[in-house]
Structures are given as structure tokens and as C-alpha cells.
Amino acid sequence: MRILLLTPQRPYPPHQGTTLRNFNLIKELTKRHQVCVLSFLDPDQDPDKPGPLPQLCEWLETVPVPQRSTAVRLRQLLLTTRPDMSWRLWSPHFADLLRHRLSQESFDVVQIEGIEMAPYLPVVQAVQPRPLVVYDAHNAEWILQERAFLADLKSPARWPAAVYSWIQRHRLRRYEARLLEQVDHTIAMSAPDMVALRDVNPRAAITVIPNGVDLEAYSNFRGQPIHYDLVFTGKMDFRPNVDAMLWFGRHVLPLIQAERPGVTVAIVGRRPHPRLDVLRQLPGVTITGYVPDVRPYIAGATVYIAPLRVGGGTRLKLLEAMTMGKPIVSTTVGAEGFPVVNGQELLLADTPEAFARAVLDLLDNPTRRLQLGRAGQAFARANYGWDSLIPHMEKIYAELQRQKS
């Protein structure tokens, strides 16, 4: 088939959830199909370093991420009923390029990668004959905003953010319901995400295809580890990641340090939000900012932590840590979407006291760390290799094409 992917960031370098998913989709799909990519280019992505994408894709075209002034964003928030996320990557230039490509070339499938690309659906729908449209829902976005609202509601200083999330939650429910109605098929990251999407549109055709991991790249890492007791990785201007590490730093880390004053923590990921600056003053805490490769930090971790209270889908960060054989302590929300058993593939803890105790027990018990790490690694290898996940997506394409004909 000939497939066009619309992506919110150029899928290289694959350093965080969206780019990791999209890069691996491309790498696997191009083994059997022709893939074209129209994408936005983040300011920190070098336009001259697209990696292997030009060799993998029939063509790759990028547009700089549009800049929204505070005044424009405020006007969109107050004078429209669309959710904020649907405005973030709106670009008339991108729409014109997409319109031109669709008028000059035919595609069997156009795949929309995430809700930020959904505003371009009308451009695709205007094409005759219209290609099949698949929406790859990176999250059930309304449930993320609901969880953010509930988390922020607990702190008076965060009440303005809670109001924002409450408004966005309602707008997203309406927007996602319409979107699911208009596309031919929706892909959800997890069973809980599918339930949340079905809640807004019970008629929607949805299939769960979770995130995967490059088993070879993470299982066979031979680089030099960078050692810290505790490691967290992620895009550090992403609200769920910011909330996770603030909660950990304020409420969990002091309990750990009461018993282990010298414990070290690495928060690894690009674009650290200014809200995280309060953690820089804490003993033993390092905020790295951008790193070219997260694997040395995961490899050097004694325990990998995922103290997430907000979010959805399936966390690529957990799969990466599992594949590298690392013991994990996560909240229930952090591990949501994975059919794991507490105490078997990882440890689950949702209160500061329980999370701190789980971390301390693992730091004190090398044998237990090894057991959990091996079980998690076997779980990831058996279920989350991209080469075994992409055929499920291809079955969706084939079935849609059969129905169309």
C-alpha cells in the first residue's frame, strides 16, 4: 500500500514517546509498503539531520512548528470551542502542502498521528476519491485532562491550571467524539484508552495496538552506563512528567533520604520545565536536560522509577527499562495499559509512603532487583517487539480496503 503519515514532530531522532512510536512505525511499514511523511519540525531538530528517514521513506517533507503568541492562544481559548490541543499545530502552510500532495498523488491510507494533527482531517476528506483515514490516538486526551484536573485540585497554587483542565476536558470529549466518527478506524494505545474513547463515542471502530520497543537496541546495549540509584526518563516539559517528578521530589524523596541520605536521582530528558527548578536544590538530584541517548542512564540505574499520576496509553519508558532488565517502581497510572502483576514484573505503589518503601526495599535487595528485572525483560520481549505489533496495523489497513472495495 501507499501510506501517508501526518506527524507532529519529525520522527527522527527518536528521543521521546511520539517520535519513538512514529519512527518504528515507519521502519516496519517500509519493509512492505511505500511510506511518505509530512511532518512538523521542532526548533531543536536539525533540518539537515533526518537520519535514515530519507532512505526509508518515498519522501519526507517538514514544516517548522508554528509559533503561537500569548494573545493568539488567549483568543483561541476564549473565542472558540475547540480544545487547545487542536490549535497547537494549526498551520495554513502545512494545510496547503497537504492539499497539494493529495491533489498530485494518490494514497491508500492517510494516518493521523495524534490529536494535534486532527485539524487537517477536512483537507484529507475533501480529496476525491478519498483515501482511508486511520487515527492513531496517542492518548485518550480527555481522560488526561480529567486526571490533571484532579491532581491540580489538591494544591491551591494549581487551581488556575485545574480550571484550564476542566474546560479542556469537556472540549476534548466533544472533539474526540466527532473525530472518531469521521475517521475510518481508530488505534488506541491500551485497553483503558479504548474504554475512555468508547465512552465518548460508543460506535467508533477501535483496535488496541500498544507502543512497542526496539528489542535489539535496548537488549543489546553495550555502551558505558551512567550510574544513579534512581532514574526517570521522559520529555520534561510534558505535564504528566513534570507532575510526576514534582510529586516524587516533594513527597517521596524525603522519605527515602531519611533512611538513605546519599541516594542519587537522575531526571533525564529534554526541555526541563521551569517548575522543576525547585528540584535542582535537592541533595542528590540531577536534571540532565537533553541527552543524545537515554540508554546509558537506564543501564546505570539501580532502580527505574515511574511516579506518574497523570496520563494514559502505554509508557514507552517502562518498556525501555523492562527491556534493559531494570527493576521498576511505578504508580498504578504509570503502568496502566500493561497487563502486569504487582510484585511480578514490577512494583506498584500509589502513596508516598508505599512508593518510598518499595524503592528502599529494592535498593537493599540485589536478588529481588534481579528477579524483577528478568521478569520484566521477558514480559517486554514476549509482547512488545515492533515486528510483532505492526502486522496488526496492516490487518486493519487490509480489512478497511476490503470493505471499501
Image (cartoon, rainbow, N blue to C red):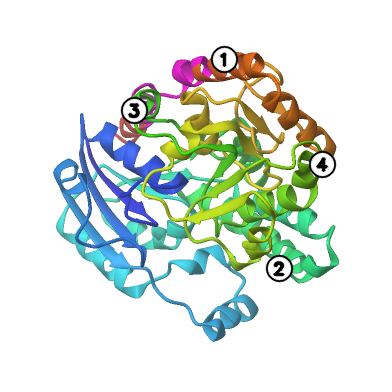
The earlier-in-sequence mark between 4 and 2 is: 2
The earlier-in-sequence mark between 3 and 4 is: 3
Please give the range of residues in magenta: 378-396
Residue at image position (18%, 41%) is 56
Q: Which residue is mark 1?
A: 375
Q: Which residue is mark 2?
A: 164
Numbered circle sitting on residue 222: 3
Q: CA distance from mark 4 to mark 2?
A: 36 Å
Disc 3 marks a residue whose amino acid type is Arg
358 and 59: which is toward the camera: 358
Residue at image position (55%, 78%) is 73
Q: CA distance from mark 3 to mark 4?
A: 35 Å
Q: Position of residue 59 (x, y in %)?
A: 17, 51
Which structural element holds mark 1? helix
Q: Which residue is mark 4?
A: 258
Query: Which quadrant: the N terminus?
Result: top left
Disc 4 marks a residue whose amino acid type is Ala
